[in-house]
Amino acid sequence: LLTTSVSTLYLSMEMTETEMFRRFQQVNHNMSKDNVIDAYKENGGLSTDRLQHIKIITTSMNKEQIKDSLNSHPSKILIVDHLKLLKKDGKQNRAVLEDYTSFFKQLALKENILVIQVSQVGRIYGRGEQKLDLFAGLDSGSIEQDSDIVIGIDGKALAPQRKVMVFKNRDGDSPFQYLEQDSDTYRYTITEEPKIPTIQIFRSKENEDGSN
């Protein structure tokens, strides 16, 4: 996102604009949170050249407000983070989600833009009780129906390894890739599949013979 310079509207309804800007700067300059803060305190800031094409909005919106924002900030990429935090306008959660996923589908086709929708996973997936799959997203039926590509990111909160899987692709394969996250800079690097440690079991000669 930082290297393409493609105009992007980022709807971040879970973090403040300051937090999002700082996190982008961590990625941009390969720096930790504390180092970015110190750079602004001691040196007055950091270069923002690679952020100029990204417009961050942190207030929850309805469909008309999203359209107005795209008119004010013409973009080729729209990121919605995340679906559950969009304005409900009196509707129930499932009806709201179905309405929005259909809206984003039509918006992408009409405006010829890429829409990236972020969704949380259900509780059983979040607790690791169920393997991550196409139906892991909350109220995932409409997400699956209205999306051309569905991607899942699997991993434990405190572990650096992530597995990125394509669960649906209307026009291609469904590959997967292992990544490793740097928790200080939020950068990811491509890595190989984690190796499962081998467990060696040693038996005494008596046990091998079947004796006690």
Image (tube, helix red, strand yellow):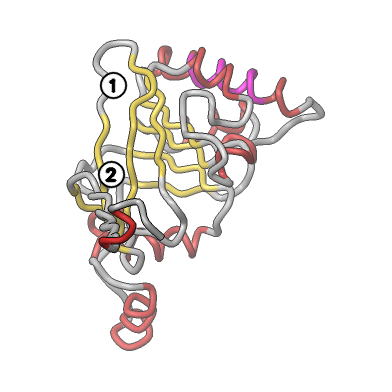
Local packing at callout 1 (Cα closer than 10 Å; few below 14, some 14-19, many 20+) is: some
Q: Which residue is found at the position 34% from the left and 75% from the top?
A: 36
Q: Nearer the viewer, residue 142 or 45?
A: 142
Side of 125 relative to 156 (left or right): right
- Residue carrying label 2: 1
Amino acid carrying label 2: it is Leu
Instruction: From the image, state whether disc 1 or disc 2 is nearer to you.
Output: 1
Q: Which residue is found at the position 73% from the left and 32% from the top?
A: 88
User: What is the span of residues highlighted in magenta in the rendered image?
Assistant: 97-105
Q: Position of residue 107 (x, y in %)?
A: 47, 18
Mark with earlier residue (1, 2): 2
Provide the major secondary structure of the magenta segment. Answer: helix
Q: Nearer the viewer, residue 109 or 72?
A: 109
Q: Is residue 173 above or below residue 4?
A: above
Amino acid carrying label 1: it is Ser
Identify the mark at residue 174; answer none if there is no mark. 1
Alpha-carbon span between mark 1 and mark 2: 22 Å
Q: Which residue is found at the position 33% from the left and 17% from the top?
A: 169
Q: Position of residue 28 (x, y in %)?
A: 26, 60
Side of 104 relative to 168 (left or right): right
